[in-house]
Each structure stands twice: as structure tokens, then as C-alpha cells.
Amino acid sequence: QVQLVESGGGLVQAGGSLRLSCAASGGTFSSYTMGWFRQAPGKEREFVSVISRGGSGESYIDSVKGRFTISRDNAKNTVYLQMNSLKPEDTSVYYCAAATSYLLVTKRNQYGYWGQGTQVTVSS
């Protein structure tokens, strides 16, 4: 069973950048498809990005395409989310999640393991 711990959140001005990290332990990291989700106050948790087990495949929600980049380092058991050109509407708690599927899954119920989340606040 894998445990996930996110870090790297914080307060940033619009147009700025942040890099989120998610460290995994307790499982074979390279056997999991890894995703990032976010949840703003009063809203549903939504898919942001996903990366395949080996790192060669990725997908993004339309609103972050061209601004966010997902990557992973299987030797370090870590997945990253580089967020550039941040907007106030990106303000959310960001969660990383692990799925046993080999597909680039995007639905919450396809992920069996979740981190505790890290807050990202973008000021205008």
C-alpha cells in the first residue's frame, strides 16, 4: 500500500510559478499511474493532470494546458507538478493520487490512494 505526501504549495502572485512534489512510500512507485487533482472551496475535486507509469504519457485538463507540466522520477519515488503563469482561479488544495491502472485515468474513483493535499493560493 502506497502512502503519498505532497509539498510545495504556498501563496504566489498571479503570473508566478510553483512546483508541487508528491513523495511516495510503501509501494512500488513505478507500478502506479500518478495523478494530480484540485479542490476549491465549495467545488468538486477535479482532475488536473496524469502521468503514466514510465513517464512517457501524460494528460491535462484544458484549463492548465501549456501552463502546467507533470513529471515523475521513479528513482526518487516522486511525482511533480510544475505550475507556471498561475491565475487566481488556480487557487485550490492540490492532491496527488495513485492508480493501479496502466491507463491515463482521470476520474476520482479510479484512484485508490491519496495524499493529504497542499494549499495553493494565487493572489490577483
Image (cartoon, grey):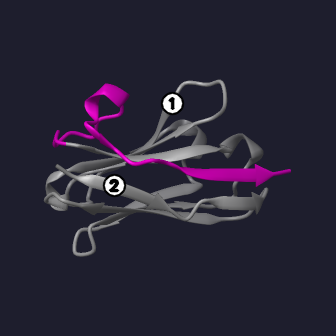
Say which mark, if any, is on residue 107: none
| Horizontal side of residue 42 vs 117, given as left or right | right
Query: Is the residue under label 1 in contact with that under label 2 (CB below 8 Å)?
Result: no
Residue that extends furthest to the right in the rendered view of this protein = 124
**Image point 25% across, 51% down: which residue?**
52
Residue type pointed to by label 2: Leu
Query: Where is residue 35 shown, x and y percent of the image?
Result: 36, 46
Disc 2 secondary structure class: strand
Please state the extent of the stretch shown in magenta in the rendering: 100-124
| Horizontal side of residue 3 vs 100, given as left or right | right
Neighbour class for label 1 at 10 Å: few (<14), some, many (≥20)?
Answer: some
Task: Judge whether residue 111 is colored magenta.
Answer: yes
Q: Earlier in the sequence, mark 2 or mark 1?
A: 2
Say which mark, if any, is on residue 4: 2
| Horizontal side of residue 50 vs 3, given as left or right | right
**Which residue is more in the foreground, 5 or 35?**
5
Mark 2 and mark 1: Cα distance apart in space: 17 Å
Residue 41 sits above or below residue 15 on the image: above
The tally of labels here is 2
Residue type pointed to by label 1: Arg
Task: Judge whether residue 14 is colored magenta.
Answer: no
**Which residue is more in the foreground, 57 or 29?**
29
**Which residue is more in the foreground, 35 or 115?**
115
Query: Where is residue 53 shown, x and y percent of the image?
Result: 20, 55
**Image point 45% across, 47% down: which residue?**
116
Query: Where is residue 20 shown, x and y percent of the image?
Result: 51, 62
**Image point 58% across, 44% down: which residue?**
93
Q: Quadrant of residue 23?
A: bottom left
Which residue corresponds to mark 1?
45
Disc 1 secondary structure class: loop
